[in-house]
Amino acid sequence: AGLVFIGPGVEHLALFGDKAKAREAAQAAGVPVPRGIDRAVTLAEAEAFFDSLGEAGGMMIKAVGGGGGRGTRAVTSRDQIETAYNRCRSEAARSFGNDALYVEEFIPRARHIEVQVLGDSAGNVLHLGERECSVQRRYQKLIEIAPAPGLPAELRESITKAAVRIAQQVGYQNLGTFEFLLEAAPGGPGRFVFIE
């Protein structure tokens, strides 16, 4: 009929709708991700991952098919794991119809930076800048500020280029948001990692 659908293709919905697969796509594009397990995990696997992080470590338990902070909990001590895991599973099942969970390291002092990306059917991808989304409640954004304040130009460029690389790697077509954490380190920003 000559109609063109404007929006994400089913392959990109499947890829980025699965947070573990999205982590793999970022890594394939040479973009760093937090330490984690890129698939659904059992409670025992979550506990073993937490133990591997050492005494000062913490982890995030997240819904594989989730978003908006649902099915997400930070765990900073071993005795919290089972309760957090079960709550995340229940929340994920209710919210997304999928109770699968994955784990990644918890970065306690981090800024949440998002990059808007636009890709077309000819393979062109560009970014539309970044925004700061660090003011949150229960992992849900309350305030977004664009551009992100106090971000050094070189770091801003590195983060936006990382978002474009991921989109190019998967042939992304549409407008989308790529989310990163920027670790707060003594003396200024530290490493950044892709989260979804």
Image: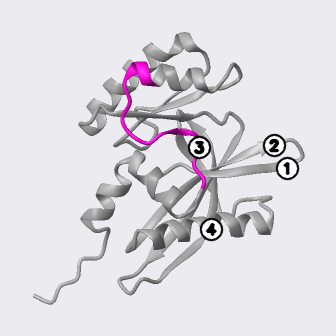
Residue holding disc 4? 160
Determine whether 166 is above or below 77 in the image: below
- In screen coordinates, is 81 left or right of 35? left
* Left/right of residue 36 with respect to residue 175 in the rendered view: right
* Disc 4 from disc 2: Cα separation: 20 Å
The nearer-to-camera label among 3 and 4 is 3
Q: Which mark is residue 185?
A: 2
Quadrant hosting residue 10: bottom left
Residue 12 x/y as whole percent? 33, 63
Q: Which residue matches tag 1?
A: 188
Mark 3, residues whose alpha carbon is within 10 Å: few (<14), some, or many (≥20)?
A: some
Residue at 65% x, 36% y: name it: 107
Q: Residues within 10 Å of mark 1 (few under 14, many from 20)?
A: few
**Residue sticking out furthest to the bottom:** 2
As measured in the structure, the alpha-carbon distance from the residue carrying label 3 to the one carrying label 2 is 15 Å
Q: Secondary structure at mark 1?
A: strand
Tell me the residue at 23%/36% (across/down).
97
Q: Amino acid at mark 1?
A: Gly
- The reply to whether the C-beta atoms of the residues labelled 1 and 2 are less than 8 Å apart is yes
Q: State the quadrant of the N terminus.
A: bottom left
Marks 4 and 1, how far apart at CA: 19 Å
What is the three-letter code of the residue carrying label 2?
Ala
> Callout 2: helix, strand or loop?
strand
Q: Where residue 161 appears, x then y in whole percent?
A: 62, 70
Q: Nearer the viewer, residue 44 or 66?
A: 44
Nearer-the-camera pick, 136 or 13: 13
Disc 3 marks which residue? 34
Residue 61 shown in magenta: no
Residue found at the very far left of the displayed protein: 1
Tell me which residue sits at (29%, 76%) in the image.
6
